[in-house]
Amino acid sequence: MFVTFFRRRKFKKQLKELINGVTYRLDCDDDILDAKTKSALQDVRAELKKYAARPSLSDQAAVNACENRLEPLMPKNDLPRKIRNFLDVLVVACTVAGGIRALYIQPFRIPTSSMQPTLFGIHYVDREASRPFMGSLTRSLMPVQASKAQVKVRSDGMVSTQYRMRSSNIISTVSDFKIGPETYTVPGDYLSQVLRYLPRPQPFYQAGDTFCDGWLSTGDHVFVERFSLFFRPFKRGDVIVFNTENISSPTQPLGGFYYIKRLVGLPGDTLQISDNILMIRPKGEKEFRPAWEFSDAFKKVYSLKGGYQGHKADGLLSLGGELTVPEGYFFALGDNTNFSLDGRNWGFIPRRNMVGLAVMIFWPVSRRWGIVDTKPPLETPTVMPAEPFFQPSAMCMQ
């Protein structure tokens, strides 16, 4: 009795596997099967389904005969076949990923400090200064998502601004610099990514002093949503990504093909900066109004907390100057206008250059992780450094 039970079970499994195999062959290779082979496979499948409807061990021989008929009709599961199947799956996966990237979501990395502290580029994070503002999860992940930047001074001496960058591996660079007679190494660009952020930089160090103790963050990685721009109008305060095709700056070369800034001017807007406040006069209106009346996103820019400093009057928007955004164009500024190459330098962005809206920071895991531009300023006053080269002290805390 038990023997019969297991034989019937094995027989049903054989039928199921044969039917599934034939069906898979017909579905996957439908476009390459000749009519004769396709007809033979369909006949065998119909016969197998007949036996599967009322399985009986008396049909075992007939099913085995069907299996023998299938052998020359089915492809061999050899290495070439496995490679072809793998490539088929890979092509489909790449096509789907490419379609999503082209039409919906595209990842970007923030390399510079122009949008800080809304979005951070590569920057130094001080261990002690950041402690009150960094959660336990972020701190535990720092060795994974940032490079250690720690220098203990070995000999008395002056800090040199001369340094040499070199590759440490295929994806990372380090900088060699001197304090007195000794050479030290930090990750990244010593001058713009480390020295500029030090909370207490000084020209002279003694042996035993700490020059830096923290990490070099690789910069925020964001997803940019590309679809809504086809049916949603842009708004003042949006964090946008655009390409720099046919855009040039008379003051310095643009640093890449894609830029990320905050949209501040719509077609027809007249703009000026007064007392570090962006003033906007929309088309058809007579009076200028401060930017925060058009979007709450600007309120933190003028909070003077966590590194936010307002907008610096410079270039095309120098003190007393104003400009009007032409039809079909937009105007954008960085949130960190002391260190931003933006519309004040190169003017307007054509509508066709718009790529999409920054929607989510997916790496690293920091207080900014999640939906872009939704976190309040860090609860610490923005203290501007004595020298304009350095970043506000709050920048190394997050």
Image (cartoon, grey):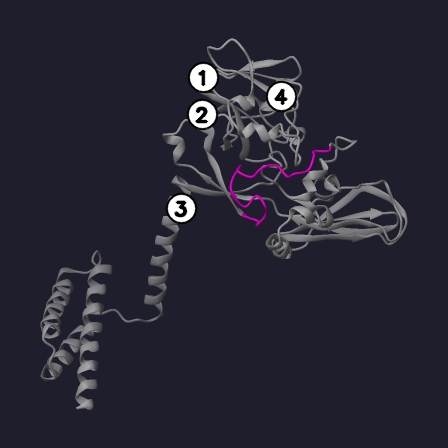
Per the image, label 3 sits on a secondary structure element best described as: helix
> Nearer the N terminus, badge 3 or badge 1?
3
Badge 2 vs badge 3, beta-carbon distance below 8 Å: no
Residue occupied by mark 4 = 277
Three-letter residue code for mark 4: Ile
Separation (CA) of disc 4 from disc 1: 24 Å
Three-letter residue code for mark 2: Arg
Residue 107 at x, y percent in the picture: 49, 44
* Residue beneath disc 1: 327
Which label lies toward us, 3 or 4? Answer: 4
Residues at marks 4 and 2 touching, judged by CB atoms closer than 8 Å? no
Residue 343 sits in quarter: top right
Q: Residue at x 19, y 65 (%)?
A: 23
Quadrant assignment for the C terminus: top right
Q: Residues within 10 Å of mark 2 (few under 14, many from 20)?
A: some
Q: Residue 300: x and y, percent?
A: 59, 31
In three-dimensional space, the C-alpha distance between marks 1 and 2, rounded to whole angstroms, equals: 9 Å
Q: Residues within 10 Å of mark 1 (few under 14, many from 20)?
A: few
**Which of the labelled discs sits on residue 351, or is there none?**
2
Residue 89 locus on image (x, y percent): 35, 58
- How crowded is the residue under tag 3: few (<14 C-alpha within 10 Å), some, or many (20+)? some
- Element on which disc 1 rests: loop
> Camera-side residue: 299 or 358?
299
Residue 362, horizontal then vertical, whole percent: 51, 47
Q: Return the disc, 1 or 2, that comes first in the chain's sequence.
A: 1
